[in-house]
Image (spheres, rainbow, N blue to C red):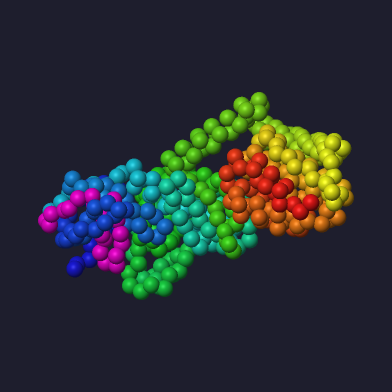
Amino acid sequence: MMATRRLYFDDSFLREFDARVLSCEPEGHNGAAAWAAVLDSTGLYPTSGGQPHDLGKLGDANVLDVRDEEDEIVHITDRELKPGAIHGCIDWARRLDHMQQHTGQHLLSAMFQERFGRPTVSFHLGAELCTVDLRGPEPTEEILEGAEHAANLIIQEDRPINVRYGTAEDLAELGVRKEVEREGILRAIEIEGADLQPCGGTHVNRTSQIGIILVRRCSRMRQDWRVEFVCGLRAERVARRDFQFLRAVAENLGVAAENVIAATERTLTERDAHFKNVRALLQRLAEADAATALQTASAHANGVCVVARVFGEDIQPEYLSNFATQLAKTEKTVALLGRFGGDLIFAQHPTAGHDMNGLLKKVLAKFEGKGGGTRDFARGKVNHAAQVEESVAFAELLLPL
């Protein structure tokens, strides 16, 4: 089989092309019927080098996927292609987006390496966002903004972008950003005065066609740092969406957009204070309710006092835990508590002499659920919330009093 001629190598702006179908075989694709077609030439880019494949049409067939299989480009279509001449067209909006992102990545990576000594070790062009992984210390905000600004200045200068061919040695002499060890003639993308990088992807012809680069955030990715960015029309969409989020938050907080950070910090401080107050109140309420419960509870023949109660779902789980803990502070006291929603807590003072974890396991074996704990405190949940009352009653029956 002859090698597929890659038309996009020499003209990434080619939107339509004519070719010949050399073969077309049935092949499943995501559970649906599909065909794998090989052409003598193609303008459709296959998934490679972090860049997703093109979409488009071959005759009346929709192109679902494009694969690079050594010398051949395989086109996955939704219908069979007959051998012979065929006309192809490329989903131009998708192709332009990919070119803006990929060329923008080359330029941004060059700025990270040249200005700040942070080489790029991987690149991913996603459906919504793009990322590069940088090697080295964590990039500060100044580095992220500096690389972004330097790249955008070059975009404004409308520098030409050229395709160069040469051996690895030829490209090394020209100052390639990342040397490769592959043999033969290599294709490289040159951003005039800024970057030279071996690449088989599709790229714009001038830096102004990138539009703009927007760096959004940086996060740890194993030993490297993942920088999230978008270019061109994506940057416009993402910036608009980010502002809409900011405006919505500002409106909810009742402040101007520029005051969102201060208002958020104030709200979080107030929330934390309220949370502490609620916890303190729940603790005091549990103490008071436990004292009342112990006053009205009667001791069994062996002197052990059992408090068995089931609460509604409106009761906070934290209150249930506090209530059980307070009851268990009194000698020879057992607390068998439930909450509609399925929660169970069994607790005791050590002098009560029972095994709460063993008791819970017996209850859960009958009513099905999960949980565990210690001899004096066990927590669980039954699978069927409606069985909480039965579970607590059953636990009380099991106690050897």
Locate residue 72 relative to residue 123 in the image: left or right: left
Extreme residue toward the front, this view: 301
Asked if 152 appears above or below 118 in the picture, the reply is above
Asked if residue 78 is among those painted magenta in the image, a careful observer would answer yes
Q: Residue at x 50, y 34 (%)?
A: 240
Residue range (magenta): 64-84
Spot occupied by residue 181 in the image (x, y as percentages of width and height): 41, 73
Locate residue 328 relative to residue 245 in the image: left or right: right
Q: Residue at x 58, y 62 (%)?
A: 222
Count of marks placed on residues: 0
100 or 256: which is nearer to us? Answer: 256
Asked if residue 280 is among those painted magenta in the image, a careful observer would answer no
393 or 249: which is nearer to us? Answer: 393
Locate residue 8 relative to residue 245 in the image: left or right: left
Asked if 351 appears above or below 15 in the picture, the reply is below
Spot occupied by residue 271 in the image (x, y as percentages of width and height): 73, 35
Q: Residue at x 36, y 74 (%)?
A: 183
| Quarter of the image where one finds residue 275 | top right
Locate residue 112 relative to residue 180 in the image: left or right: right
The answer to whether residue 198 is visible is yes
Spot occupied by residue 79 in the image (x, y as percentages of width and height): 19, 50
The answer to whether residue 269 is visible is no
Spot occupied by residue 302 in the image (x, y as percentages of width and height): 85, 51
Q: Residue at x 74, y 54 (%)?
A: 356
26 or 303: which is nearer to us? Answer: 303
- The secondary structure that dominates the magenta segment is strand
> From the image, which quarter does the N terminus lie in?
bottom left
